[in-house]
């Protein structure tokens, strides 16, 4: 674990974790998080950002001049289904675009509690349908996301299968939250070790997203869905995260369903440490690994 990563973890524990342990409402939480739109140093001048509207859903193309024209990544941001968007995730989007050679479609899906489950899944599916309608081939597409966005990515894949649509060529998931019942062993086992996330925060997010509906619903908690027939996945998680068991159980269930999933556990890394790629070497290394997976799955590097 690098010195920079240790410093960031201490900083997260003293700031963000305190906020996540004492959330006093959605509006207040959004205001607090509004001033921390990512830890990146800013978007480079050669990053191209193109806003677009997909059936009323705000999106952005993130790419470079030499990005592939026909190979794309569909990306869903994290934020517990109640916060997050372009400001918080443009940094990771351009880094994934650079590492993979793909264009990245960053989706600003509807947030809870104003638009509770299944609004986010509907938006995610609509954007995938749009890409198909625009002529992008499933074998040239990657779906991905972080935290709640990682869970949303898996839910979208399950919904895509249920609708009889062709699956993309792969999925990349960073600290995916796939169990809204908050029942994984690491939720309590890593409660003290995790420098950022907590059971209290996850319960708050789940209550606002799902409300009185069944938290085990397959498209809300895709860990409980039929995971057969999904594309190969690369899953990253930190060893001390409360969501470590979400990642572990997801990969195990995919394998039990005769699928292909690889889990990489990064020692000591905080929740979605890839968002810190501009600050810590581990984040940069992780993004490069995700980019290589994306290139290999879409043959973009050939």
Image: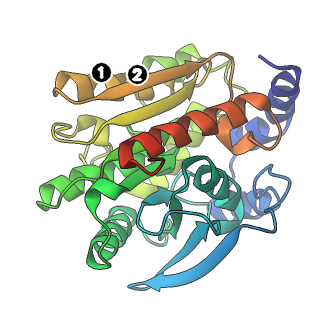
Report x, y in % for residue 293.
46, 38
Q: Residues within 10 Å of mark 2 (few under 14, many from 20)?
A: some
Task: Name the outermost residue toward the left.
Answer: 164
Task: Residue 19: name its quadrant.
Answer: top right
Q: Quadrant of residue 166?
A: bottom left
The outermost residue toward the front is 302
Task: Tell me how far mark 1 sits from mark 2, CA to CA.
Answer: 6 Å
Q: How is the image coloured?
A: rainbow
The residue carrying mark 1 is 252
On the image, the x and y values in percent for residue 61 come to: 56, 72
Name the residue at 33% across, 67% down: 128
**Residue 248 as seen in the image, left or right of residue 90:** left
What secondary structure is marked by label 1?
helix
Question: Relative to residue 249, is residue 208 drawn left or right?
Answer: right
Look at 39% across and 47% down and name the residue there.
Answer: 299
- Identify which residue is drawn at 29% across, 42% down: 222
Name the image quarter holding the N terminus. top right
Which x, y percent locates residue 163?
A: 14, 62
Q: Nearer the viewer, residue 245 or 299?
A: 299
Give the numbered dot on residue 248: 2
- Total numbered badges shown on the rendered structure: 2
Q: Which mark is residue 179?
A: none
Crowding near pointer 1: few (<14 within 10 Å), some, many (20+)? some
Q: Judge whether 291 appears above or below 66 on screen.
A: above
Measuring 40% from the left and 22% from the top, which residue is drawn there?
248
Q: Do residues under tags 1 and 2 come within 8 Å of each other at their CB atoms?
A: yes
**Helix, strand or loop at mark 2:** helix
- Looking at the image, can residue 151 be seen? yes
Residue 16 higher or lower than 131, as above or below: above
Q: Is residue 141 above or below residue 222?
A: below
Residue 271 placement, left or right of 219: right
Residue 287 in the image: x percent, y percent?
62, 39
């Amino acid at each position: 674990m690098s010195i920079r990563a240790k410093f960031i973890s201490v900083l997260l524990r003293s700031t963000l974790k305190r906020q996540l342990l004492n959330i006093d409402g959605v509006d207040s939480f959004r205001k607090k998080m509004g001033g921390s739109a990512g830890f990146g140093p800013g978007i480079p001048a050669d990053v191209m950002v193109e806003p677009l509207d997909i059936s009323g859903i705000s999106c952005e193309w993130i790419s470079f001049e030499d990005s592939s024209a026909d190979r794309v990544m569909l990306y869903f941001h994290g934020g517990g289904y109640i916060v997050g968007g372009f400001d918080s995730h443009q940094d990771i989007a351009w880094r994934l675009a650079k590492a993979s050679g793909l264009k990245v479609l960053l989706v600003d899906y509807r947030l809870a509690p104003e638009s509770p489950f299944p609004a986010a899944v509907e938006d995610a599916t609509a954007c995938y349908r749009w890409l198909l309608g625009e002529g992008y081939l499933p074998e040239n597409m990657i779906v991905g996301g972080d935290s709640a966005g990682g869970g949303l990515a898996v839910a979208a894949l399950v919904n895509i299968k249920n609708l009889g649509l062709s699956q993309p060529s792969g999925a990349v998931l960073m600290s995916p939250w796939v169990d809204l019942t908050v029942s994984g062993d690491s939720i309590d086992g890593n409660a003290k070790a995790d420098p950022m996330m907590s059971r209290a925060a996850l319960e708050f997010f789940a209550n606002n997203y799902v409300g009185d509906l069944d938290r085990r619903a397959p498209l809300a908690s895709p860990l409980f869905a039929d995971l057969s027939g999904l594309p190969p996945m690369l899953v990253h998680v930190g060893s001390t995260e409360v969501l470590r068991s979400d990642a572990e159980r997801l990969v195990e269930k995919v394998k039990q369903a005769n699928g292909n999933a690889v889990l990489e556990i990064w020692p000591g890394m905080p929740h979605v440490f890839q968002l810190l790629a501009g600050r810590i070497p581990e984040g940069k290394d992780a993004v490069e690994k995700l980019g290589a997976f994306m290139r290999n799955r879409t043959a973009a590097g050939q």
